[in-house]
Image: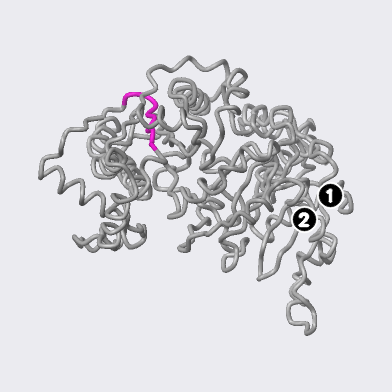
């Protein structure tokens, strides 16, 4: 670090940055300022109070200490290596570099390049007031020149961005989908760079097609201690798979957080210790479903918010790697305009024993209704009863077909992975609708023993094959397609696929369980 006196011009620029540093950034005001082409900064800082504080410090500290502190604030030039060494030597674990995944196969149009520029500006704005806590890594997959130039242009303006480029692509294994293979390989390479080469302890991962909430970094910084205090928590996610505003407590749930067995991804945080465990067996494809298998997950959970802190930018994502399968669900998610305020108490409630005890009590005090009663909206009849505290409700789910019916009625995500419904915790899927809390409860859950039984004893992988069959039947067993018995293993249905020239389509479905 250069300790020479600063020229006047550089001093003025640094002092301007100092004023910007102590401002409270409001992202929405910033966007309005950009749209209205205003030149004023949408924040305020009391410089007199700040100056008075420094005067007091001069009388309370040695001259050397003041020079060091003042130089840090004015020059704002802690590079990545200096900062990493400084914090690691002092056992501070606030360093959370961000890996912005940019998939080469997605980046083909000027519109997407412009979106990358906007995404970098969005992230940079939200961390400007605390840049040293969140050094940012942008990892580019491949050598698309437009993407490279866009990233370099931004990096030349911001000194806490680092550009990584994934240089090589191994050939995918036989029958592996090329895009899924590239995604998985890029993840492994980028995380090795962050954890193994740069020595960071924690990382937040986002992607080029995700927009982030104004309290995105505050959310992660607040919840990060949970990764170290509770060994049953292995990730923090900013995403709620059932985050449609009609399924969450939009008015009162900004601070509400949940435990979930189902890995959400889509803006998530992990530790270097976990990465060392995962990297040796990192899969060639479908890395997120791999994390959902209990032999990998080992009954550990993620923390996820009631209201999502990330949003899929469908202009960038398009159909995405899933071919648009989840487009309707993703397009329904919204970012809140309020900012959370997490207390220590809020976080302690998420540790396993505390959370399980509260959930057990909540479920025991809930009213149980049949699936048909819930589908018919009977829970609404309790809303207007006097002298009755607004109750929550339980509905038992006996198989994937029943869960599919519930999902269609309330617009929940119906797919099942490793026997788990999305957002489930110990067999319970919470959702909030019509100002009422409901819980879809797996048939095997004994409420009186909630939290005492490991999750791997609750979920049944056979539900995956049954759920796949339901997907198949919804696509092909309709009045406009196949009207016979819906059995892909029957000779009559296989012959029908042959006459259509679709036998390869049928084979791609793989194993299913007809029920």
The magenta span reads 135-143
Q: Is residue 333 left or right of residue 53?
A: right
Q: Which one is in front, 363 or 42?
A: 42
Identified at 52% across, 55% down, the residue is 333
Whole-percent x, y for residue 298 in the image: 73, 31
> Which label's residue is closer to the chain start, 1 or 2?
2
Quadrant holding the C terminus: top right
Q: Which image quadrant is residue 148 in?
A: top left
Residue highlighted by disc 1: 450
Cβ atoms under marks 1 and 2 closer than 8 Å:
yes
User: Is residue 74 among the parts visible in the rendering?
Assistant: yes
Identified at 63% across, 61% down, the residue is 247
**Residue 138 drawn in magenta:** yes
Whole-percent x, y for residue 116 in the image: 33, 41
Q: Which image quadrant is residue 293 in?
A: top right
Identify the secondary structure beneath mark 1.
loop
Q: Is residue 105 left or right of residue 377?
A: left
Residue highlighted by disc 2: 359
Identify the secondary structure beneath mark 2.
helix
């Amino acid at each position: 670090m250069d300790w020479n006196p600063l020229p006047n011009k550089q001093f003025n620029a640094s002092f301007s940055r100092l004023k910007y540093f102590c401002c409270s950034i409001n992202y929405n005001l910033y966007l309005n300022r950009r749209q209205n082409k205003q030149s004023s900064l949408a924040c305020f800082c009391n410089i007199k109070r700040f100056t008075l504080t420094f005067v007091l410090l001069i009388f309370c500290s040695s001259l050397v200490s003041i020079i060091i502190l003042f130089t840090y604030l004015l020059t704002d030039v802690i590079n990545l290596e200096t900062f990493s060494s400084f914090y690691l030597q002092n056992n501070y674990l606030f360093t959370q570099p961000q890996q912005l995944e940019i998939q080469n196969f997605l980046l083909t149009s000027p519109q997407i390049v412009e979106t990358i520029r906007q995404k970098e500006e969005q992230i940079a704005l939200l961390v400007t007031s605390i840049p040293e806590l969140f050094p940012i890594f942008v990892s580019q997959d491949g050598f698309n020149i437009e993407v490279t130039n866009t990233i370099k242009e931004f990096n030349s303006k911001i000194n806490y961005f680092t550009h990584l480029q994934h240089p090589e692509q191994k050939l995918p294994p036989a029958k592996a989908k090329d895009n899924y293979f590239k995604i998985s390989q890029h993840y492994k390479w980028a995380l090795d760079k962050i954890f193994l080469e740069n020595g960071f302890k924690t990382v937040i991962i986002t992607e080029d097609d995700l927009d982030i909430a104004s309290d995105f970094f505050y959310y992660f910084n607040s919840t990060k201690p949970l990764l170290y205090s509770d060994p049953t928590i292995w990730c923090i996610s900013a995403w709620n798979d059932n985050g449609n505003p009609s399924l969450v407590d939009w008015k009162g749930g900004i601070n509400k957080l949940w435990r979930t067995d189902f890995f959400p991804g889509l803006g998530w945080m992990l530790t270097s210790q976990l990465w060392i465990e995962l990297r040796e067996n990192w899969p060639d494809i479908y890395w997120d479903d791999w994390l959902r298998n209990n032999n990998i997950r080992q009954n550990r959970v993620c923390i996820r918010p009631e209201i999502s802190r990330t949003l899929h930018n469908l202009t960038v994502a398009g159909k995405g790697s899933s071919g648009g399968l989840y487009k309707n669900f993703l397009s329904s998610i919204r970012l809140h305009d309020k900012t959370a305020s997490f207390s220590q108490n809020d976080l302690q409630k998420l540790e396993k024993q505390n959370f399980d005890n509260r959930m057990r009590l909540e479920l025991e005090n809930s009213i149980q209704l049949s699936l048909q009663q819930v589908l018919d909206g009977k829970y609404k009849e309790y809303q207007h009863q006097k002298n009755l505290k607004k109750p929550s409700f339980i509905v038992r789910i006996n198989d994937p077909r029943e869960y599919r019916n519930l999902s269609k009625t309330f617009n929940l995500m119906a797919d099942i992975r490793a026997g788990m419904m999305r957002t489930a915790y110990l067999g319970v899927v919470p959702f909030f609708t019509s100002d009422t809390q409901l819980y879809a409860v797996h048939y095997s859950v004994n409420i009186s023993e909630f939290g005492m039984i490991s999750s791997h004893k609750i979920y049944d992988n056979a539900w995956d094959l049954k759920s796949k069959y339901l997907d198949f039947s919804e696509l092909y067993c309709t009045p406009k397609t196949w009207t016979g018995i819906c059995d892909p293993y029957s000779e009559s249905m296989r012959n029908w696929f042959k006459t259509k020239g679709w036998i390869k389509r049928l084979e791609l479905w793989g194993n299913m369980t007809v029920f």
